[in-house]
Image: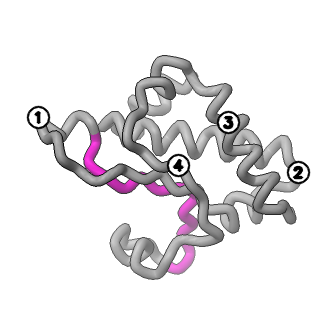
Amino acid sequence: MQISDEDFQRLINQALETLPGEHVKNIANVAILYEEDPTDEQRQQLLLRHDQTLLGLYEGTPLSQRQGMTRILPDKITLFKGPLSRRANDEVVLQEDIRHTLWHEIGHYYGLNHQRISELEK
């Protein structure tokens, strides 16, 4: 589906508002942004095959691994507009995919594994 940058940002903002409060309000020093597609470098770092899709990416040091570090660069969560919008057939599905992907990447910020992220999302 086609969606403007402004509408995609609006859906990200709406998704943030619907995520569990304590997890979202405690995020600090994290930029949440979007790009059209992952870069070749990002795909190579994750060892993605040509047939694999990346919807979002957390880049940084998870809270669970910081162990007293105080001077670190901001973390970054990137949602990929291209893959997300290509898999959605309407805005409702896109909104849910954005919400799910954002929640997943926020889970990585907290140092959670995939199983725990899924458990907390329910």
- Give the residue displayed 53% in from the left and 49% down from the top: 32
Q: CA distance from mark 1 to mark 2?
A: 44 Å
Q: Position of residue 91 (x, y in %)?
A: 86, 47
Give the class, few, some or many, for how many residues have Cα within 10 Å of label 1's Cα (few <14, many ≥20). few
User: Observer-nearest residue: 59 or 121?
Assistant: 59
Q: Tell me residue 110's x, y (percent).
A: 34, 34
Tell which tag, 2 or 4, sits nearer the viewer: 4
Span shown in magenta? 50-62
Q: Is residue 7 magenta?
A: no
Name the front one of labels 3 and 2: 3
Distance from the alpha carbon under mark 3 to that under mark 2: 16 Å
Q: Nearer the viewer, mark 3 or mark 4?
A: 4
Name above or below for residue 30 compared with residue 43.
above
Q: CA distance from mark 2 to mark 4?
A: 23 Å
Circles 1 and 2: CB distance less than 8 Å? no
Q: Residue at x 18, y 40 (%)?
A: 65
> Of the residues shown, which amino acid type is indicated by label 3?
Ala
Of circles 3 and 1, the one toward us is 1
Compute the Cα span from label 3 to label 1: 31 Å
Q: Which residue is mark 4?
A: 32
- Mark nearer the N terminus (1 vs 2): 1
Residue 14, picture quadrant: top right
SS state under label 4? strand
For disc 3, the marked residue is 15
Magenta: main secondary structure: loop
Front tag of 1 and 2: 1
Mark 1: which amino acid?
A: Gly
Q: Residue at x 79, y 56 (%)?
A: 6
In percent of width and height, residue 13 lies at 68, 39
Q: Read off the residue under disc 1.
A: 68
